[in-house]
Amino acid sequence: MRQLIVGVDPGTTLGYAVLDIDGRIIKLGSSKLLNLSSLITEIIKLGKPLIVGCDKHLVPDFVGKFSTKIGARVINPEEDLHVVEKKEVIHYYLADTKQSILPGNLHEADALAAAIFAFKRIRTVLDKITKFVAENKKQEHKQRITEIVLLNETLNIKEASEMILRAEKNNLKREEDLLAMKYADKKKHFNEQDYLKLYSKLKASEKEISLLRNQNANLQNLLKNSANVKVKKIRVLDRNSQDKLQFKENRIQQFQQLLHLKSQQVDIFKKEISLLNMFLTSLKENILMKKLNTLSYNEYSVKNALLNISAGDVLLVNDLSIFSAQTLKELEDKVSVIVYRKNITNKIKQAMPFILLPAEKLNLQESKDFAVCSREQFNHAKNNLNILAEIVEQYKKDRYGM
């Protein structure tokens, strides 16, 4: 599928400009009848948008919603582009590329300027990707590397390539994943964006462990130097020196405590990395769950920013008795199954528009923000729940004539 860069100029008359990944104009358009849905429909006919450009420092609400809906990254200037700047950008671009498609009005011109600005910002990265795939003979991976690197700024080109190879090695190609998930539950529980997020967190944790190790080494050197100073001066101390020594001893104790704390943090990160690796390599046989403590709106808002709760996800909630109507409304179209820990009343169960499975029925393996269980065990528990519900319903009909 053709990869796209889209410039958007929101307003009463909506203007848009579409470039391919090489910076060639595909289409320009504007209309008072365009809204968010119709613009998305218009764009996805042309290809897969990766980048959305705008000419404002503060991203307009319409542009933000548009980029979120299509899963693209927004590129905006540090300061608003002025009229003169936009004219110059378009003039030199058209002169260099000799494009035959020209903007028909100011709205299309502003959108084109935003798209060109975004293209120039990523051009160096695109050139590096082209060079990398040529040198490493990975031309067949160019589009996927481009998509991963442009959408995930924390990943470099080499890491993106390694991730693709790892996915292929572990039979995690997108087509195979989708078929397996459709066969198991007819819902997509784990998509490539979730996989990328887990991989990014893994790499960030590895870097943080490296930094912690360096800091520990520096602290150990500082402890050694402080001890040497203490030995040299201990026989010639006066009252003032004793005060200084006491201060240094206190500092040594503080550093020792800090060193111990850092070592504990390293152990925690190692365990987290081990769990994440296990989760990544077992997704074909397991169901991934995203963890929340409650369904209060504050808890949901904070965790959703981290976990990106999407359609088809399964949640593991500690206490379902704490919930808000707003949270239920936002989750209703995304989540169909929730696994819960603490027992809840029938009244609460009836208020929940979800299939509710008790955690005690499942053998869970957990990290801080995720949990997995056997896909077979999960489906068995869900099917048993459906059978029980049918039995109860039939009993009510037979007993009370309902």
Image (cartoon, helix red, strand yellow):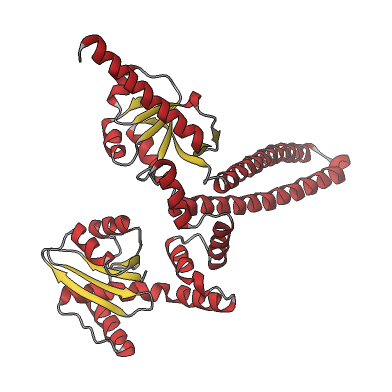
Q: Would you say 129 lies left or right of 296 here? A: right
Q: Would you say 351 lies left or right of 379 here? A: left
Give the x, y percent position of residue 122: 42, 72
Q: Quadrant of residue 244?
A: top right
Which of the two residues, 112 or 360, is positioned nearer the viewer here? Answer: 360
Does residue 24 sit above or below 354 in this rendering? below
Which of the two residues, 135 or 202, is positioned nearer the viewer here? Answer: 135
Which of the two residues, 210 or 15, is positioned nearer the viewer here? Answer: 15
Q: Is residue 318 visible?
A: no
Q: Quadrant of residue 312?
A: top left
Does residue 94 sit above or below 20 in this rendering? below
Q: Quadrant of residue 115?
A: bottom left
Please give the name of the residue rendered at 33% of the width and 31% of the height, measured from the top-left corner: 354
Please give the name of the residue rendered at 36% of the width and 45% of the height, measured from the top-left corner: 310
Give the x, y percent position of residue 131: 53, 78
Please give the name of the residue rendered at 57% of the width and 76% of the height, measured from the top-left corner: 137
Residue sitting at the far front: 398
Rendered-image quadrant of the N terminus:
bottom left
Give the x, y percent position of residue 110: 22, 73
Give the x, y percent position of residue 53: 31, 68
Picture mark count: 0
Please give the name of the residue rendered at 46% of the width and 25% of the height, measured from the top-left corner: 341
Does residue 90 sit above or below 53 in this rendering? below
Q: Is residue 257 visible?
A: yes
